[in-house]
């Protein structure tokens, strides 16, 4: 089960796609006792980097629906974009992270 899913497969064509975070699944991955219920989240950022680790895409998902919009331009590097970090925030400034070792490679995105 992925942390976030897209309404359609993203392409390198500048067409916006909707990304939705599965907040229940995300909570199950977090070891931070502060972030244990969805009402503690105000924002979830999912961060991807290109295969050369030069380009970066941050998708901002705002609660309570935890949806965000992303697009990749025709100039985005093709190949496997790595999901390297997920950053969770509450409305009062608390932050928690999942890093690449916690996310794994099964959530990477291939852009052709």
Image (cartoon, rainbow, N blue to C red):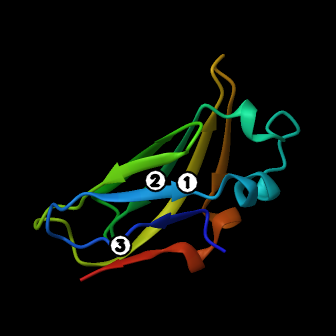
How packed is label 2: few (under 14 Cα within 10 Å), some, or many (20 or more)? some
Count of marks overlaid on the render: 3
> Helix or strand or loop: what does disc 1 sit on?
strand
Question: Looking at the rendered structure, which numbered label has been put on residue 27?
Answer: none
Q: Which residue is disc 1 drawn over?
A: 85
> Helix or strand or loop: what does disc 3 sit on?
loop
Q: Earlier in the sequence, mark 2 or mark 3?
A: 3
Q: Residue furthest left?
A: 74
Q: Position of residue 26 (x, y in %)?
A: 71, 55
Q: Earlier in the sequence, mark 1 or mark 2?
A: 2
In the rendered view of the protein, which quadrant contains the C terminus?
Answer: bottom left
Q: Nearer the viewer, residue 68 or 35?
A: 68
How far separated are the C-alphas under marks 1 and 2?
5 Å
Q: Earlier in the sequence, mark 1 or mark 3?
A: 3
> Helix or strand or loop: what does disc 2 sit on?
strand
43 horizontally vs 75: left or right: right
Q: Are marks 1 and 2 in contact (CB under 8 Å)?
A: yes
107 horizontally vs 54: left or right: right
How packed is label 3: few (under 14 Cα within 10 Å), some, or many (20 or more)? few
Question: Looking at the rendered structure, which numbered label has been put on residue 47?
Answer: 2
Residue at x-position 35% and y-position 63% = 53
In the rendered view of the protein, which quadrant contains the N terminus?
Answer: bottom right
Q: Position of residue 81 (x, y in %)?
A: 38, 71
Q: Which residue is disc 3 drawn over?
A: 8
Residue at x-position 55% and y-position 54% = 85
Residue at x-position 60% and y-position 31% = 42
Locate residue 19: give its quadrant.
bottom left
Q: Position of residue 71 (x, y in %)?
A: 25, 58
């Amino acid at each position: 089960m992925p942390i976030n899913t897209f309404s359609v497969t993203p392409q390198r064509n500048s067409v916006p796609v909707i990304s939705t975070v599965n907040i229940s699944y995300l909570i199950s991955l977090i070891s931070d006792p502060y972030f244990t219920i969805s009402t503690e989240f105000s924002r979830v950022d999912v961060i991807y980097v290109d295969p050369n680790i030069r380009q970066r895409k941050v998708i901002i998902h705002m609660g309570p629906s935890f949806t965000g919009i992303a697009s990749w331009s025709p100039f985005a590097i093709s190949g496997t974009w790595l999901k390297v970090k997920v950053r969770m925030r509450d409305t009062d400034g608390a932050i928690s992270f999942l890093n690449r070792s916690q996310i794994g490679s099964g959530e990477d995105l291939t852009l052709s």
